[in-house]
Image (spheres, rainbow, N blue to C red):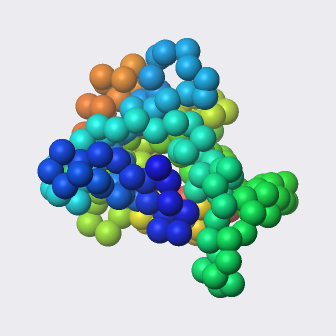
Amino acid sequence: MYDALTARYTFACPARGDARVTLSAFRSLERLPAASHPAVYRVRFACPCGDEHVGLVGHDDLDWAPLGLSSVPFLNVMTARLDAAEDLAALAAQRIGAGEWPWTFFCYPEERPRPVYPSAFCMLAPGDRSLGVAVRCPACHKVSVNLVTHAHVDLPWHHDREVGVVPHVFADDAARLVEEFQAELYSSGFDARRLSLE
Ligand SMILES: [Zn+2]
Ligand SMILES: [Zn+2]
């Protein structure tokens, strides 16, 4: 499902069979209402074939696999040997424990950066060289829209020093959120905010 070597998720593509896409190719994420554990997310993604398709991702694959936190051994490209996943898990835990978060965003209603996981992303839209991301804050549950680089989303622990923030408090209901996201992303100005969590 997730390949840590290429930072890509594998989905089914009706035209090509398999589609391997990065997190930044996701266009929307929606947690399925079924009370399954772990949770399952319905993802709409931009496929290399030119179409958008829908796929399902488990919570573990979404949030933990990019950190190497899976039961699958990980090929270390430096040593060309299979490392135990536990080594990576320990390393990830150590970094998070030291306050280095794999993903962050700027919460507009709270006017502060917050740590986050990919399951908090609701919508993504590509721009010129950047990506608009709607994130539901795990602390205040409000949605903020940030303008970031693709790497900021695709690579854990890769943070933009500064992000664009849409100065708008977004709607809570899903339908209006989609409308507002599209309207604000392409019309309004962005305020620059530093993302340092210190
Ligand atoms: Zn496709
Ligand atoms: Zn918040």
**Which residue is drawn at the image coordinates 63% and 34% (left, top)?**
138
Residue 137 vertical placement versus 94 (above, below):
above
* Left or right: residue 136 compared with residue 150: right
Where the C terminus falls, by quadrant?
bottom right
**Which residue is drawn at the image coordinates 64% and 82% (left, top)?**
80
Residue 56: which quarter of the image? top left
Q: How far across and how far down the image is residue 2, in percent?
A: 50, 54
Residue 9 vertical placement versus 84 (above, below):
above
Residue 173 vertical placement versus 142 (above, below):
above
**Which residue is drawn at the image coordinates 19% and 55% (left, top)?**
16
* Of residues 157 and 33, the one drawn nearer to the viewer in this rendering: 33
Q: How far across and how far down the image is residue 196, in percent?
A: 68, 62
Q: How far across and how far down the image is residue 147, in percent?
A: 42, 56
The answer to whether any part of residue 38 appears in the image is yes
* Of residues 184 and 76, the one drawn nearer to the viewer in this rendering: 76
* Left or right: residue 6 compared with residue 71: left
Q: How far across and how far down the image is residue 158, in percent?
A: 59, 67
The answer to whether any part of residue 103 appears in the image is no
Question: How many labels were placed on the picture?
Answer: 0
* Of residues 61 and 116, the one drawn nearer to the viewer in this rendering: 61
**Which residue is drawn at the image coordinates 42% and 64% (left, top)?**
150
